[in-house]
């Protein structure tokens, strides 16, 4: 989901969606199962990039999405470790 306030032009929003699908496909095997909604934290003003199809824009979006999904993976791994530790302590008693 890419609202107009983050990318004013439709071509930019479509590019961001394509990149998001690609990044999500790469991270999907390591993410917990479920329905995922990606929400960008920052907007991408046309003035910052040469065009809506610029390599700089694509790289900025990939970096942001990779960081978001890596944070999810680390939180998920920490949560799994905590569940295993609490489950392991109860099973021995």
Image (tube, rainbow, N blue to C red):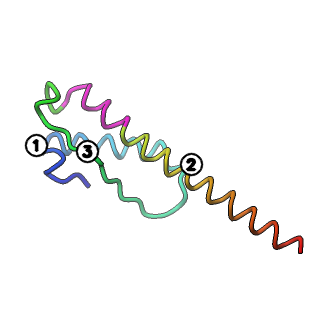
- Specify the segment rendered in magenta: 53-63
Residue highlighted by disc 3: 42
Q: Is residue 62 magenta?
A: yes
Q: Is residue 43 magenta?
A: no
Marks 1 and 2 sit apart, C-alpha to C-alpha, by 33 Å
Question: Could you tell which of marks 3 and 2 lies nearer the N-terminus?
Answer: 3
Residue at point 75%, 62% (across, down): 85
Say which of 62 and 19 sits in front. 62
Residue at point 21%, 26% (across, down): 54
Tags 3 and 2 in contact by the CB under 8 Å rule? no
Residue 54 to residue 16: above or below: above
Residue 67 in the figure: left or right of residue 76: left
Question: Could you tell which of marks 3 and 1 lies nearer the N-terminus?
Answer: 1
Are there few (<14), some (14-19), or many (20+) residues within 10 Å of tag 1? some
Give coordinates of residue 91: x percent, y percent. 84, 72
Residue at point 69%, 57% (across, down): 81
Write down the quadrant of residue 67 in the picture. Answer: top left
Q: Quadrant of the N terminus?
A: bottom left
Residue 51 to residue 80: above or below: above
Write down the quadrant of residue 59 in the picture. Answer: top left
Residue highlighted by disc 2: 74
Marks 3 and 2 sit apart, C-alpha to C-alpha, by 22 Å
Question: Could you tell which of marks 1 and 2 lies nearer the N-terminus?
Answer: 1
Marks 3 and 1 sit apart, C-alpha to C-alpha, by 15 Å
């Amino acid at each position: 989901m890419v609202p107009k306030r983050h990318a004013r032009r439709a071509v930019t929003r479509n590019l961001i969606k394509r990149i998001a699908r690609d990044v999500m496909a790469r991270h999907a095997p390591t993410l917990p199962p479920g329905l995922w909604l990606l929400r960008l934290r920052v907007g991408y003003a046309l003035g910052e990039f040469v065009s809506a199809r610029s390599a700089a824009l694509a790289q900025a979006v990939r970096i942001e999405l990779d960081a978001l999904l890596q944070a999810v993976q680390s939180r998920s791994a920490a949560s799994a470790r905590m569940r295993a530790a609490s489950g392991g302590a109860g099973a021995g008693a």
